[in-house]
Image: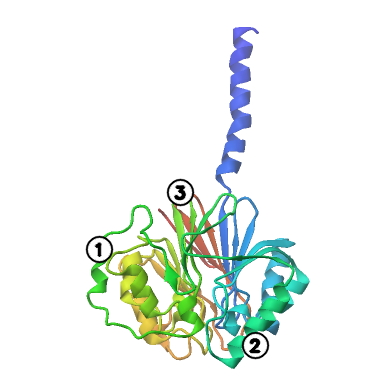
Amino acid sequence: MHPGWQGIFAVLLLLLLVPLSEAKSSKSLHIYSIDVEGGQSTLIVAPSGQTLLIDAGWPGKLGADRVLALTSQLGIKKLNYVLITHFHRDHVGGIPDLAKQIKVGTFIDHGQNRENSDITRKDYAAYEKAIAGSKHLVAKPGDRIHIKGLRVMVLTADGQHIAHALPGAGQPNPFCAGEPEWPMDHSENAYSLGTLTTFGKFRFLDLGDLTKRKESDLMCPNNSIGSVDLFLVSHHGLDQSNSKALVDAIHPRVAIMNNGARKGGSPEAWQTVHDSPGLSALWQLHYAEAGGKEHNVADDFIANTHASSDGNYIEVTARSDGTFTVKNSRNQFEKTYAP
């Protein structure tokens, strides 16, 4: 080949390769905090396209209907995994309807219901019936959920927690010193299946409704988790959870509170998260009526500003370098947080 043509060919090849590399690097992790009015439903879509739904909200329109509206909007026809943090109705109630209307690869939970209450036994029985014949995994602390392109690790399950600190963590936790000895909780909350999702340098923590005694077991005397970029505020922002030993120690850059208008978002827990050292922003699924103006963020950061449930969600788009953008579907307001 003539030397001149070699140079031209090299330039053309470079022009062809650059867009391909840019397209590859632009693949992102998407996390959707769905409005199920004070319950939980969080959809994770990996860069590979594989999906993980954490919880399905309440029965009826504040559960499966909201999840399916979003999956339809996104063109998702199958959920690779559906993970149930625990068997309270605001987390597991939507499963019977959901399982009838969308294909699910594998259901994951912490094992049998541990709560001695009629309503939870009823909801657990409905869940068992709904997933009968489906692939089902019982997760234990330290297990990994295999989603291409992500590292999803189980930190807590069935009242237990990881035996060893995660890589880079394990330092003494100075925020344990001020923690009282919290009472034992015998509800399903204490058995929550909690996960850490990692995409490159980006880390997302969701501990379900784990309560303060179990938070202390996980985080004291040493910090087993380290710091995170995004924290789904535990237990919808109720004060039975969200101890300083957890919230302050993980140093979240951003937190999302999946509260309802009249559930969660308690002033005490809101203040703990709001004051967490290094926090850049707190976002809320709903304006919390109990908090008033003093314990709610600015309207731009709230997906649903009225008591009626409007179904607006919060979307997080994360890159492997740790950069992520949070967007309010109600008004399209968004903010990007640099690594």
**Nearer to us: label 1 or label 2:** 2
Q: Which mark is residue 122?
A: 2
**Where does residue 18 sit, x and y in percent of width and height?**
58, 34
Q: Which mark is residue 321?
A: 3
Q: CA distance from mark 3 to mark 1?
A: 27 Å
In the figure, residue 240 lies in which quadrant? Answer: bottom left
Q: CA distance from mark 3 to mark 2?
A: 44 Å
- Depth check, front residue: 165 or 271: 165
- Depth check, front residue: 191 or 96: 191
- Depth check, front residue: 13 or 103: 103
Q: Is residue 334 left or right of residue 34?
A: left
Evaluate whether residue 174 shows in this view. Answer: yes
Q: Which residue is mark 1?
A: 172
Evaluate whether residue 294 shows in this view. Answer: no
**Nearer to us: label 3 or label 2:** 2
In the figure, residue 181 lies in which quadrant? Answer: bottom left
Q: CA distance from mark 1 to mark 2?
A: 42 Å
**Where does residue 200 sit, x and y in percent of width and height?**
47, 49
Q: Quadrant of the N terminus?
A: top right
Q: Secondary structure at mark 1?
A: loop
| Other residues around mark 1 within 10 Å, as few (<14) / some (14–19) / many (≥20) | some
- Residue at 35% x, 86% y: name it: 183
Of mark 3 and mark 1, the one earlier in the sequence is: 1
**Nearer to us: label 3 or label 1:** 1
